[in-house]
Image (tube, rainbow, N blue to C red):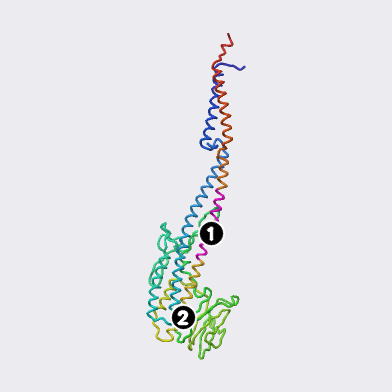
């Protein structure tokens, strides 16, 4: 049996009125914040998905920060290598000028002074900071200048490690190159083979052009060209076995194992030249060799020939070092291009995440306003019903 009382009717009407007011207040809050997901209880599944998407978005922002940092360093590396290339280009110009037979020893000494200044500039470039308390060419040991002048050359305090930086999900770029790879391990000669004259040579044999004519025949071995009387020569391998012989003519190429070398002038009996795979030398040592050649004061034809061979060798090594710097710049350019690609990828992912988050959280104003109007009408009806109910009493039915 159901009991009906005036108090029950009053409480029921009041509960309905409060419920409609709460619904209207919620919709007003949605319209004010432009969000339909105000608390996790509104949509537990959607709220969980939104938290996961927020984390993914934050991760993309972190990747963006990584990309900005490494992009700054790679950009500064590009600027530093451009300056280094300009320095090496100027040294090349001076070396070509120094090869002129019309220059005096004083002229070459003046060139040596400028080359010394350029060498110091190159060392400063090798110790370039990144503006954030680190150094560009120190590898992972980049808290202090990586290069220092020591007795007999240059000391490198960095390491050979190149950082890998994540700039997008499972997408990495390399940080700046360590200085050991930029300035120290530089090929000599033409980058593949190298030719040198013995310091004890007494003739006027000068090294001209050389290179590989058939890479398939080149075995990477070391060979020695030894001259005898009347231009006769023998080519022996590393074991001392004679592998070729002939009679030298000024400017004629000598070939062995797919390699050729042109020797000008007249080598003396006992003069020798070495031919083998190009080694590596730091660029500062190459410049020091050039300075040594520039400061010679030759008085005999043999000494002048030795100076010319040294200058020609320095010029070849510097040209190869210039090519090496271009290769390093190209590598840095590839990393910068990867940064641009990663930025596009991050933007696409961010847009997708934001679109999904908008679908979960953002309010559909047209739908919300319709619900607001409906709840407003319902609230007004409840209020009117409550007023009418207050005027009634069961005692009226008992009269």
| Circle 2 residue | 309
Main SS, magenta residues:
helix
Q: Position of residue 103 (x, y in %)?
A: 41, 81
User: Which is more toward the observer, 84 or 56?
Assistant: 84
Q: Quadrant of the N terminus?
A: top right
Count of residue discs? 2
Vertical position of residue 37 compared to residue 256: above or below: above
Asked if the stretch drawn in magenta spans residue 338, the answer is yes
Residue at screen point 40% across, 68% down: 121
Residue at screen point 41% across, 78% down: 294
- Alpha-carbon span between mark 2 and mark 1: 42 Å
Q: Residues within 10 Å of mark 1 (few under 14, many from 20)?
A: some
Find residue 349 and name its label: none
Residue situated furthest right in the rendering:
1
User: Which is more toward the observer, 256 or 2?
Assistant: 256
Asked whether the beta carbons under mark 2 and mark 1 sit within 8 Å of each other, the answer is no
Residue situated furthest top in the rendering:
399
Report if residue 76 is visible in the image. Answer: yes
Where, by quadrant of the figure, is residue 119 drawn?
Answer: bottom left
User: Which is more toward the observer, 256 or 93?
Assistant: 93
| Circle 1 residue | 337
User: Which is more toward the observer, 177 or 161?
Assistant: 177
In the picture, measured across the screen, residue 254 lies left or right of residue 307, that is right
Q: Position of residue 182 (x, y in %)?
A: 47, 66
Q: Secondary structure at mark 2?
A: helix
Q: Quadrant of the C terminus?
A: top right
Q: Tell which circle, 2 or 1, labels the residue nearer the N-terminal end.
A: 2
Report if residue 282 is visible in the image. Answer: no
Q: Position of residue 95 (x, y in %)?
A: 44, 76
Segment colored magenta: 328-350
Q: Position of residue 381 (x, y in %)?
A: 57, 23
């Amino acid at each position: 049996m159901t009991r009906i009382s005036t108090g029950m009717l009053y409480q029921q009407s009041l509960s309905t009125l409060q419920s409609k007011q709460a619904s209207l207040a919620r919709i007003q809050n949605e319209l004010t914040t432009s969000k339909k997901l105000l608390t996790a209880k509104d949509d537990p599944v959607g709220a969980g998905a939104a938290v996961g998407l927020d984390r993914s978005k934050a991760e993309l922002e972190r990747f963006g920060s990584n990309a900005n940092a490494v992009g700054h360093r790679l950009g500064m590396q590009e600027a530093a290598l451009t300056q280094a290339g300009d320095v090496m280009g100027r040294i090349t110009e001076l070396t070509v000028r120094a090869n002129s037979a019309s220059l005096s020893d004083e002229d070459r000494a003046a060139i040596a002074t400028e080359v010394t200044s350029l060498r110091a500039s190159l060392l400063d470039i090798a110790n370039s900071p990144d503006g954030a308390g680190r150094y560009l060419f120190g590898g992972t040991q980049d808290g202090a200048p990586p290069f220092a002048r020591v007795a007999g050359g240059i000391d490198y305090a960095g390491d050979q490690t190149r950082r890998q930086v994540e700039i997008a999900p499972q997408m990495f770029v390399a940080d700046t190159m360590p200085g050991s790879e930029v300035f120290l391990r530089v090929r000599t000669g033409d980058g593949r083979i190298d030719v040198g004259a013995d310091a004890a040579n007494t003739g006027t044999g000068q090294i001209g052009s050389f290179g590989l004519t058939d890479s398939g025949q080149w075995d990477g071995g070391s060979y020695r060209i030894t001259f005898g009387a009347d231009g006769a020569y023998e080519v022996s391998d590393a074991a001392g076995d004679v592998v070729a012989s002939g009679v030298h003519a000024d400017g004629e190429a000598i070939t062995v194992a797919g390699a050729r070398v042109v020797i000008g002038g007249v080598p003396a009996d006992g003069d020798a030249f070495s031919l083998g795979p190009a080694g590596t030398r730091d660029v500062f040592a190459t410049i020091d060799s050039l300075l040594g050649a520039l400061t010679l004061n030759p008085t005999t034809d043999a000494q002048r020939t030795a100076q010319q061979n040294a200058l020609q060798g320095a010029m070849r090594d510097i040209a190869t070092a210039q090519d090496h710097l271009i290769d390093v710049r190209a590598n840095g350019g590839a990393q910068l291009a990867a940064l641009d690609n990663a930025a596009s990828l991050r933007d696409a992912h961010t847009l997708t995440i934001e679109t999904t988050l908008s679908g979960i959280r953002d309010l559909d104003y047209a739908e919300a306003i319709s619900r607001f109007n409906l709840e407003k009408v319902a609230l007004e009806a409840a209020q009117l019903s409550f007023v009418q109910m207050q005027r009634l009493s069961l005692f009226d039915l008992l009269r």
